[in-house]
Amino acid sequence: MRQLLFILVILAVGAVALAPAIALLGLDPMPGDFAVNQGDWHFTVPVTYSLCASLGLGLFYYLMKR
Protein backbone atom coordinates (compact mmCIF):
# COMPACT_ATOMS: atom_id res chain seq x y z
CA MET A 1 0.00 0.00 0.00
CA ARG A 2 2.83 2.35 0.88
CA GLN A 3 4.58 1.71 -2.45
CA LEU A 4 1.40 2.47 -4.40
CA LEU A 5 0.96 5.76 -2.54
CA PHE A 6 4.61 6.62 -3.18
CA ILE A 7 4.22 5.92 -6.91
CA LEU A 8 1.05 8.02 -7.12
CA VAL A 9 2.75 10.94 -5.36
CA ILE A 10 5.74 10.77 -7.71
CA LEU A 11 3.40 10.60 -10.71
CA ALA A 12 1.45 13.64 -9.51
CA VAL A 13 4.59 15.68 -8.81
CA GLY A 14 6.06 14.70 -12.18
CA ALA A 15 2.85 15.60 -14.00
CA VAL A 16 2.68 19.03 -12.36
CA ALA A 17 6.36 19.63 -13.12
CA LEU A 18 5.81 18.61 -16.76
CA ALA A 19 2.79 20.90 -17.20
CA PRO A 20 4.72 24.08 -18.16
CA ALA A 21 6.78 22.21 -20.76
CA ILE A 22 3.64 20.78 -22.35
CA ALA A 23 2.06 24.26 -22.36
CA LEU A 24 5.13 25.78 -24.05
CA LEU A 25 5.14 23.08 -26.72
CA GLY A 26 1.45 23.71 -27.37
CA LEU A 27 0.50 20.03 -27.28
CA ASP A 28 -3.17 19.21 -26.98
CA PRO A 29 -4.34 17.42 -23.84
CA MET A 30 -4.56 13.66 -24.13
CA PRO A 31 -7.33 11.50 -22.67
CA GLY A 32 -6.58 11.00 -19.00
CA ASP A 33 -5.18 14.48 -18.44
CA PHE A 34 -6.80 16.65 -15.79
CA ALA A 35 -7.96 20.11 -16.82
CA VAL A 36 -8.89 22.94 -14.44
CA ASN A 37 -10.87 25.85 -15.85
CA GLN A 38 -11.85 28.83 -13.73
CA GLY A 39 -12.97 31.87 -15.65
CA ASP A 40 -10.13 32.90 -17.95
CA TRP A 41 -7.59 30.74 -16.09
CA HIS A 42 -6.83 27.29 -17.59
CA PHE A 43 -4.40 24.67 -16.27
CA THR A 44 -3.88 21.14 -17.55
CA VAL A 45 -2.07 18.44 -15.57
CA PRO A 46 -0.55 16.10 -18.19
CA VAL A 47 -0.89 12.71 -16.48
CA THR A 48 -0.82 10.73 -19.73
CA TYR A 49 2.26 12.55 -21.05
CA SER A 50 3.93 11.97 -17.68
CA LEU A 51 3.22 8.23 -17.85
CA CYS A 52 4.54 8.03 -21.41
CA ALA A 53 7.71 9.93 -20.50
CA SER A 54 8.24 7.76 -17.43
CA LEU A 55 7.81 4.52 -19.38
CA GLY A 56 10.09 5.77 -22.15
CA LEU A 57 12.84 6.82 -19.76
CA GLY A 58 12.51 3.60 -17.78
CA LEU A 59 12.87 1.54 -20.95
CA PHE A 60 15.83 3.65 -22.06
CA TYR A 61 17.63 3.17 -18.72
CA TYR A 62 16.86 -0.55 -18.76
CA LEU A 63 18.34 -0.94 -22.24
CA MET A 64 21.42 1.13 -21.33
CA LYS A 65 22.13 -1.05 -18.28
CA ARG A 66 22.15 -4.24 -20.39
Image (cartoon, rainbow, N blue to C red):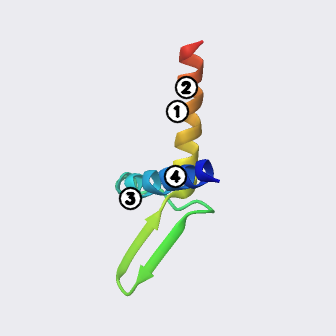
Q: Looking at the picture, tell me which residue is in the foreground, 39 or 34.
A: 34
Looking at the picture, which amino acid does disc 1 mark? Answer: Leu
The image shows residue 24, relative to residue 33, as above or below, that is above
What residue is at 50 percent from the left and 72 percent from the top?
35
Circle 1 residue: 57
- N-term mark: 4 or 2: 4
Badge 3 or badge 1: first in the primary sequence: 3
**Which image quadrant for residue 23?**
bottom left
At label 2, which amino acid type do we have?
Answer: Phe
Question: How many other residues sit within 10 Å of disc 1, few (<14), some (14-19) or many (≥20)?
Answer: few
Question: Of circles 3 and 2, which is in front?
Answer: 2
Image coordinates of residue 51 in percent, x first then y, are 57, 48
The residue lying at 35 percent from left, 56 percent from top is 20
Give the amino acid type for the residue marked by disc 4 in the picture: Leu
Q: Which residue is mark 3?
A: 23
Q: Which quadrant would the C terminus be assigned to in this image?
A: top right
